[in-house]
Structure formats: C-alpha cells, structure tokens
Amino acid sequence: MINWDDIRYFLAVARQGSITAAARDLGVNHSTVSRRIAAFEENMGARLFDRVASGYVLTQAGQEMVASAQRMEEEALSLDRQLYGRDTELNGELRVAAAGPLINPFIMDQLRLFLADYPGISIDLVISHEVANLHAREVDVAIRATNNPPETLVGRRMGRLTAMLYGPADFVAPGEPGAPNSAASPDLVTYSWREHNYAEAAWFRDVYPHARKRLTINTPDAMLEAIRAGVGIGMLPCHIGDVSEGVRRLPPYRAEGFLDLWLLTHADLRKTAKVRAFMNFMAAAILPHKDLIEGRRPPQFSSGEDMRAKSSYQPMSSAG
C-alpha cells in the first residue's frame, strides 16, 4: 500500500527538481528526503528520478506517476479542508495573508480590535507579495488585490484600489497660489511596473511637462517614504497617501483605479467559525471606508484621525 507521505515527498522533489529545495519546502532535512525517495523507489520497484548534475529529473516511470500523485494530493487536501471547515470553535490559530502595502495603520488597528473581541483566536499574519495558496490551506484568509480571483475561492469585494498623485507636504503645485516657476519640472519618483507608467500619461505631462525621473521604486510603501523624504512627487494608493502624514495630494487630482480589493477564503472553509468571524469583522471595518480606498475623499484632509474606528462588533455564535 502506498503511504501518503511518500507521495508528498515524491511530488516535492518532482516540483522542485532537487533534494535540497524539496527539503526546504517540506520543512525537513536533506537526508530525510533522500532516504524517503530511495525507499519509495524500492517499494514501487521502479526508478522514479534520474540523478543528474543539475538535480533530480523524472524518469518515464516518474512522469507517468505524477498525474496520479497529484490526484491523490488534491483528495487529501480536499478532505483536510472539509474537516477543518466543520470547526465551530472561536479559538485557535487563524492564518491570514496580505501584501505589505495593504497593511496600513487602519488595517492593523482593525486586527488589534479583532483580537480584543475574540480572545480565543490568534492570528498568524503572512506578509508577502506572492499569491497566497488558499487552495492548499497554507493560509485560511487572504486580503488580496486582484482583478481575477480564482474560481475556487469565495469572498467579498471591498472596493477598487485607486491611486493619485502625491507630493511632500510643502510642495506647491502649478496653478496653486505661490507656485514657483520650477513647479512644472519637479523631480519624479516612478514605479518599475509597466502598468504604473503614469509619467508618460497625457494628464500628467499637461501639468508637469518637464518632470525629471530621478528614482524608480517597486513598492507603494517605499514610494511613500521617498515622497515624504522629499525625493520627488509620485503616485500612491489613496488608502496609503490619504492617511499618511508628510504627504498631500497634488493636482490634477486624477484617480487611477488599478486593482480590486478582496477578502478571500476557500469555499470549503467559509463556514468555519473563526474564518467567518474574521471575514465579517473585516468587511464591517473596511466597507464604511470605501471612499478612502477609491479616492473620493476631499483633496484636503486630516492625517487620518477619523480612520481610527472603535470596535462595535460582538463575537458571533457558532450558529450565527
């Protein structure tokens, strides 16, 4: 009889192409993986991998086994999710994934309030720009910015993340009272992503025809720090720029929507008590501030004091 653990080790090596990478993925040491693969090949009566200089390469027999092994993996993961999804207890660990720029002070405040309202639950927060693997239950809930959530996931759309142009608090833009002649040629901080090449947009060049690209950055949180430090002007998501001190919106106040904000979980986990409690809580916290996410707050605003919502949530019963 085939041991499920043998299949896990086999698939890890097949996917990673090396014993070392598979061991790191499985959280075990190198010798354990090597020993398990050798024992599995002996049990199957076939050589599944060729050992070459570049690593482990599937043999014909190994290639024929991959599809069956993947089906076994899917069945095991499905059973795991179904059993976990029957959990009716508001306690234990909840694994939540989010990209770093989504965890602004407001979201962190709401995590604090959630933990206060649900003392039996602890959160393992994974900050990553990689797509969280909800399918394999590496996490239970994801706060994700995406225009195409996978069909296997369910959740709620919180709004469309929107960006505008920001500058240091003391920057005076063209057309504003006291604007210097040099205001139309500021230093510019840009993103390295092609889809955020706002510096070439007609609306930007109309107002800032001689802007000079001086610094290229690949994350919004780094962009915030560069603008706040006075390196130059640049685009920021409104949910970051509008609640951050030391920066302000600049004309022409043009909103650029780029990604939808979602709370997501796997369909098998949506009835789990702590998953349901977390998603309901965060939706109730975020949705009232959809205007902030979508850039509809006035150009002049406070430093975000009105965002510090107090907890008014009650713990859900397992039957709720």
Image (spheres, rainbow, N blue to C red):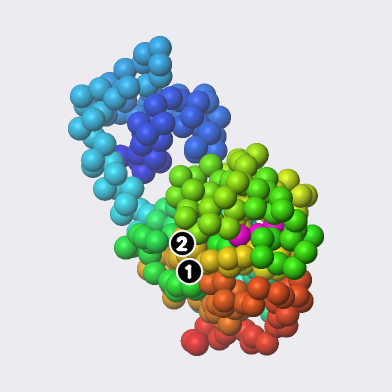
Q: Determine whether 94 is above or below 19 in the image.
A: below
Type of amino acid under label 2: Leu
Q: Separation of disc 1 and disc 2 at Cα?
A: 6 Å
Quadrant in the picture for residue 99: bottom right
Q: Is residue 80 left or right of residue 25?
A: left
Q: Determine whether 226 is above or below 237 in the image.
A: above
Viewer-nearest residue: 59 or 35: 59
Q: Is residue 243 left or right of residue 87?
A: right
Q: Determine crowd level at label 2: few under 14, some 14-19, many 20+ residues with C-alpha closer than 10 A.
A: some
Give percent across and percent down for residue 205: 53, 53
Q: Which residue is mark 1?
A: 160
The kind of secondary structure element at disc 1 is strand
Q: Quadrant of the N terminus?
A: top left
Q: Determine whether 97 is above or below 1 in the image.
A: below
The magenta-colored residue range is 165-169
User: Is the C-beta separation of discs 1 and 2 under 8 Å?
Assistant: yes
- Give the number of the disc on residue 259: 2
